[in-house]
Each structure stands twice: as structure tokens, then as C-alpha cells.
Amino acid sequence: SILTMITIRKSDDRGIANFGWLYSRHTFSFGHYYDPRHTGFGPLLVINDDVIAAGQGFGMHPHRYMEIITVMVEGVLGHRDSMGNHGFLEPGDTQWMTAGSGVLHKEGPSEAAQRSGGRVHGLQLWVNLPAAEKMRSPSAVRMPTRSSGSSRSRANALPMSRLMAWSMAL
């Protein structure tokens, strides 16, 4: 059963990256952290718990072949990508980006957060797309916590269908 495959990893047991401007806990091997016992879970490759210092962030960088889900915990994260999307994620908001054949994006504390000295704290998950979907066109869906019921339902339709597909892959 899938439940017998799940290992609970407490925060203190996860990998750490501390670059001064970025403090991150890695559930699975990522970047400079490698643990051969924890390299992912089926198509789920990354669960990072990131805290980004005020005035910092990730400059424009590429992604491809992945679904990238960002969930905001604290602060306001600015996002801009090569598809023309730009906006902000507030605590509780989720962004679902399908990198597919390739996308460039940048993210970091919003200008208002930077002026007030605020940091941002969020969770990011990366899911490997199935081979047949790796070259699909990139897309992004932002799911604010305060949206109306009808638009929230439409916004969740795509991600929920993707989650169903992932669960079948496990």
C-alpha cells in the first residue's frame, strides 16, 4: 500500500540550505543537499520550505518538464514570467505553473514587502511531468484565497485534474 511507503520527516531531519538571503528546508535531495534515501516520491521531486529575506529573491531563471506549485505562508511574493503573467501571492494563495516545454520566471518579496523590511515564507513543490506531457505549452494558474466561489472553482479544475493524474502515477 502507498501508506507503507510514506516516511514522516520532521523539519529538523530535512536538508538545509542557508545562503544568507535564502533559508530552505528540503524534504528531498535538492541543489547542494543530497540524501540517497530521500530523492523524491514517485513524480514528486521537490518539497522545499523557503524563507526569502527582504530585498532578495530569485532572478529570472528557467524551468521545464515540471509542474511547480507555490503556496504562500507569510509575506507577499512577487512573480513575473515569460508568458506575460505578473502578480503577487499573499498568505494562503497558491500558484500552479506548468513549465512544460520551458518558461522563464522570477520571484521574490514584493516591492511593498521590501520597503517594509518583510521577508516571505512559502512552500514549493515540483512534480515531474509524464513523458507525453513534457513538451506541452507552459501555463500558470493563480488561486487566491479570497476569490469568489465560481472563479475559484474554475481555477481549481485544472490543478485538481492534474493531481488525479499524479495519484494514478504513484
Image (cartoon, rainbow, N blue to C red):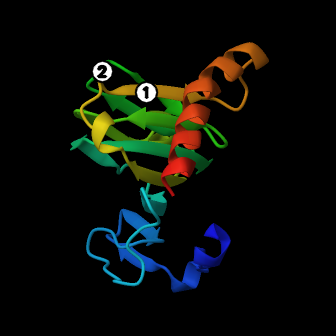
Q: Position of residue 51 (x, y in %)?
A: 48, 60
How dense is the environment of label 1, judged by Cα within 10 Å: few (below 14), some, or many (20 and up)?
A: some
User: Camera-side residue: 105 or 137?
Assistant: 137
Answer with mark 2 or mark 1, whichever residue precedes in sequence: 2
Question: In the image, which disc is placed on residue 124?
Answer: none
Q: Which residue is mark 2?
A: 83
Taking 33 as reference, is 41 above or below it? above
Q: Position of residue 52 (x, y in %)?
A: 44, 57
- Say which quarter of the image contains residue 152: top right
The residue drawn where x is 46% and y is 62% is 48
Residue type of the residue flagged with mark 1 = Ala
Q: Position of residue 124 (x, y in %)?
A: 48, 53
Mark 2–mark 1 Cα distance, whole angstroms, equals: 8 Å
The residue drawn where x is 38% and y is 63% is 22
Taking 47 as reference, is 155 above or below it? above
Name, please, the residue furthest toward the right.
149
Name the secondary structure under disc 1.
strand
Taking 131 as reference, is 156 above or below it? above
Is there any visible trace of residue 76 in the rendered image?
A: no
Residue type of the residue flagged with mark 2 = Met
Q: Position of residue 157 (x, y in %)?
A: 62, 25
The residue drawn where x is 24% and y is 32% is 135
Question: In the image, which disc is placed on residue 140?
Answer: 1
Name the secondary structure under disc 2.
loop
Whether label 2 touches label 1, CB < 8 Å:
yes
How dense is the environment of label 2, judged by Cα within 10 Å: few (below 14), some, or many (20 and up)?
A: few
User: Camera-side residue: 32 or 134?
Assistant: 134
Figure disc tally: 2
